[in-house]
Image (cartoon, helix red, strand yellow):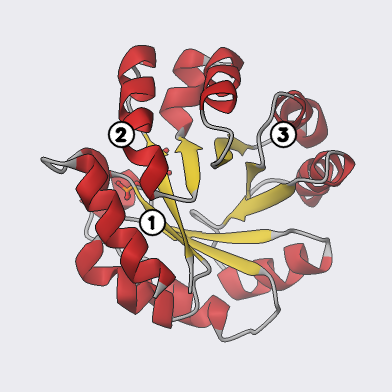
Amino acid sequence: MALTQMALDSLDFDATIALAEKVAPHVDILEIGTPCIKHNGIKLLETLRAKFPNNKILVDLKTMDAGEYESEPFYKAGADICVVLGVSDIGTIKGVIKAANKYGKKAQVDLISVEDKVAKTKEVAAAGAHIIGIHTGLDQQAAGQTPFADLAAVAGLNLGVDISVAGGVKAATAAQVRDAGATIIVAGAAIYGAADPAAAAAEITAIAHA
Ligand SMILES: O=C([C@H](O)CO)[C@H](O)[C@H](O)COP(=O)(O)O
């Protein structure tokens, strides 16, 4: 059993809301992707929070510095999860964890471009990170990379933290990701690129929840 998260990666405010309206009933978590939050800002989070009270909302800030200062306004505005980069300073990561705990929310550490993912996972789990993000970014996917080997290595640690997996996951690979230990399955292009995004979201969620 895993939760599903849909990555909203459009830059367009209204198109993002329209897509969220289609998929929200079929996923557990709505993700405001990094390009989307940079382009649209906290107003988009406030709008989604008001419209979708039944979904968790993740804001993919990919914070690199000033962890507490940058993330706190987003938790205050209703984010359930904010993302900090694993390649950032441990003080930055601890700052996001501190802000999350202040609001009873969660901090996710994204391991994108982290060289030693096992060592980083142990370090940030000990610091109180709630979720480890195994993430093959869009540019890394374009170069042919996948998240599966990293997932196996991190899940094998059995640290008891949630593990989110993103990077080209689709219905055909969702069961593999779930069975390998992911507790959150992220899909972006597999949903927003489908002819029927609601149906694509429902298909992945049925696999994740099985
Ligand atoms: O996090 C993402 C990317 O870095 C841009 O913010 C994507 O939302 C994430 O990779 C999920 O999208 P897909 O890989 O298309 O499933």
Q: Which-is-in-front pick, marks 3 and 2?
A: 2
- Which residue sits at x=66%, y=34%? 79
Residue density around tag 3, few if under 14, some if 14–19, many if 20 or more, within 10 Å: some
Q: Mark on residue 65?
A: 3
- Which residue sits at x=82%, y=69%? 126
Pick whichever of labels 3 and 1 is earlier in the sequence: 3
Q: Quadrant of the C terminus?
A: bottom left
Residue 205 at what x, y percent from top left?
Answer: 36, 60
- Is residue 117 positioned above or below 90 on the image? below
Residue 162 at what x, y percent from top left?
Answer: 62, 67
Q: Mark on residue 22?
A: 2
The three-letter amino acid code for the residue at tag 1 is: Thr
The verdict on label 1 being within 8 Å of ligand 1 is yes
Q: Judging from the image, what secondary structure is the residue with disc 1 in?
A: loop
Pick whichever of labels 3 and 2 is earlier in the sequence: 2
* C-alpha span from label 2 to label 1: 26 Å
The three-letter amino acid code for the residue at tag 2 is: Lys
* C-alpha span from label 3 to label 2: 34 Å
Q: Which residue position holds label 1?
A: 136
Q: Judging from the image, what secondary structure is the residue with disc 3 in?
A: loop
